[in-house]
Image (cartoon, rainbow, N blue to C red):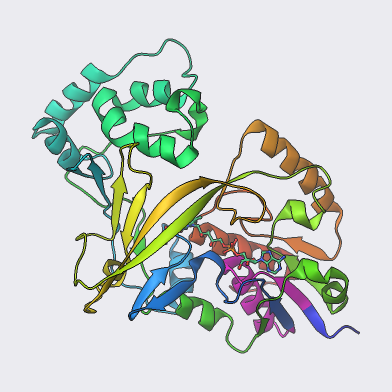
């Protein structure tokens, strides 16, 4: 008989939800995380009384009432609505592309005028677009592409838009109403008091060991539990036997200002190529903070190298093929469950990760679990 029923590697949302539900079912869980805090990428650090999103701005949104009720059962969410603005060479535009943006770009006031302007600019590409530039021009035309898409996307991926595959931009939603709400989902907000509250509530009364990397002594950790839930990097789990999966990384520069309100909005996108960061985040606005000071974070996209944080998977043919080889190995495992963004090599929003953790729990425990 092993000491624990489940060893959960990673205390991000996937690991925390799984641990919570398994504990509710009477299973004994141990959660380990190599970082010095729980929560994975939703973790916030308290600086000057402000919850600073350490791994990039996180805004919770979902259309799924079940998931919304689930997270709200742990912590109440506020009414924050994401309405980013774009700064292009000092000009300010509302996002997502909507009637406010079109007024700011062209002085047009009605949907008909905006539609006419966009259709006149759209480049009919014969056949399928072969790169991001062609794709964007065929969807929204020259002005929106040049002022709001080109520089931002090139910084994000570190390559010219002409060299980026068209699939990166599948759709570019255009809204012919004066609505600056970035998401179309029914529910959105930020946990009141920050994301750590959600994680703390999920992991309440569960044993968590921080600063503990599974790979430093995988035999010891594996031998402690009947089952393993692995939410780390899938290629590392298999000692990179087929090669390393590639990612895009980010670097964050946090700055404290002795100022009440620095940029007037939580999220400002810098859409020109010349400014090296893509976004500037003023964290207090996520929670309508009234602290005397403010913390602003600039987000710099970077090349990923082993050892750096893996943020965005590069789901091109090469990497997806590599991942499918690792996945085939996962499917043969009997006592290991793989879940979360790193083990499945896919970008997921928080609500999707929570949904997939709950589905995993349901399938794994096979009982009629009410979650
Ligand atoms: P993670 O949070 O990465 O957790 C994995 C954990 O496993 C980490 O704590 C890690 O330290 C640990 N771990 C890994 N390997 C080991 C090991 N060997 N030993 C021990 N521990 C290990 N989603 C939204 O819904 N809205 C947003 O606005 C949003 N913004 C985002 C912005 C950025 C920049 C990024 C990158 C993502 C964003 N997301 C957003 C997505 C969100 O971050 C993820 O959906 C979610 O955090 C994934 O949870 P996870 O548990 O799968 O992974």
Residue closer to the observer: 185 or 254:
254
Q: Let me know if residue 176 is in the magenta part.
A: no
Quarter of the image containing the C terminus?
bottom right
In the rendered view, does 313 fall on the left or right side of 30? left
Name the side, left or right, on which 143 lies relative to 226. left
Residue that lies at the very extreme toward the bottom in this rendered image: 205
Answer with the quarter of the image where residue 206 lies.
Answer: bottom right
Q: Position of residue 65 (x, y in %)?
A: 43, 64
- Residue 257 sits in quarter: bottom left
- Which residue does the image show at 40% across and 78% down from the upper left? 46
Ligand 1, image quadrant it occupies: bottom right
Indicate the quadrant containing the N terminus: top left, top right, bottom left or bottom right: bottom right
Q: Is residue 108 above or below residue 296?
A: above
The image quadrant that residue 308 belongs to is bottom right
User: In the depicted view, which residue is nearer to us: 1 or 286?
Assistant: 286
Q: Which residue: 8% across, 32% down?
A: 107
Position in image of residue 214 (x %, y %):
76, 69
**Residue drawn at 84 percent across, 46 percent down:** 241
Measured as percent of width and height from the top left, residue 319 is found at: 68, 38
Against 120, residue 343 (above or below) is below
Q: Is residue 255 left or right of residue 203?
A: left
Q: Identify the magenta region.
A: 6-28
Between 69 and 19, the one nearer to me in the picture: 19
Do we see residue 57 in this rendering? no
The answer to if 9 sits in the magenta stretch is yes
Asked if residue 113 lies left or right of residue 209, the reply is left
């Amino acid at each position: 008989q092993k000491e624990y029923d489940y060893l959960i590697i990673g205390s991000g949302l996937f690991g925390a939800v799984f641990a919570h539900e398994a504990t509710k079912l009477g299973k004994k869980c141990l959660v380990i995380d190599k970082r010095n805090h729980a929560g994975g990428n939703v973790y916030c650090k308290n600086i000057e009384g402000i919850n600073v999103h350490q791994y990039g701005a996180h805004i919770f949104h979902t259309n799924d009432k079940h998931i919304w009720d689930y997270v709200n059962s742990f912590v109440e969410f506020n009414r924050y609505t994401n309405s980013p603005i774009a700064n292009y060479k000092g000009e300010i535009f509302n996002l997502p592309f909507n009637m406010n943006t079109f007024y700011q770009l062209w002085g047009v006031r009605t949907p008909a005028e905006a539609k006419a302007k966009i259709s006149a600019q759209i480049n009919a590409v014969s056949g399928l677009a072969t790169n991001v530039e062609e794709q964007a021009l065929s969807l929204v035309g020259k002005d929106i592409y040049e002022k709001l898409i080109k520089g931002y996307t090139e910084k994000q991926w570190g390559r010219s838009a002409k060299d980026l595959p068209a699939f990166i931009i599948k759709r570019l939603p255009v809204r012919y109403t004066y609505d600056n709400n970035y998401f179309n989902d029914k529910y959105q907000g930020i946990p009141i008091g920050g994301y750590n509250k959600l994680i703390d509530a999920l992991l309440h009364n569960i044993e968590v060991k921080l600063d503990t990397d599974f790979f430093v002594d995988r035999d010891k950790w594996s031998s402690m539990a009947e089952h393993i839930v692995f939410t780390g990097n899938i290629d590392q789990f298999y000692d990179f036997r087929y090669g390393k999966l590639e990612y895009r990384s980010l670097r964050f520069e946090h700055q404290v200002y002795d100022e009440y309100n620095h940029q007037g909005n939580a999220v400002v996108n810098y859409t020109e190529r010349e400014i090296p960061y893509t976004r500037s985040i003023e964290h207090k606005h996520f929670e309508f903070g009234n602290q005397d000071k403010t913390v602003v974070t600039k987000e710099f996209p970077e090349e990923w190298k082993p050892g750096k944080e893996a943020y965005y998977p590069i789901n091109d043919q090469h990497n997806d093929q590599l991942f499918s080889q690792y996945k085939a190995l996962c499917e043969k495992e009997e006592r290991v469950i793989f879940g979360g963004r790193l083990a499945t090599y896919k970008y997921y929003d928080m609500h999707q990760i929570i949904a997939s953790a709950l589905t995993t729990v349901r399938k794994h425990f096979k009982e009629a679990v009410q979650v």
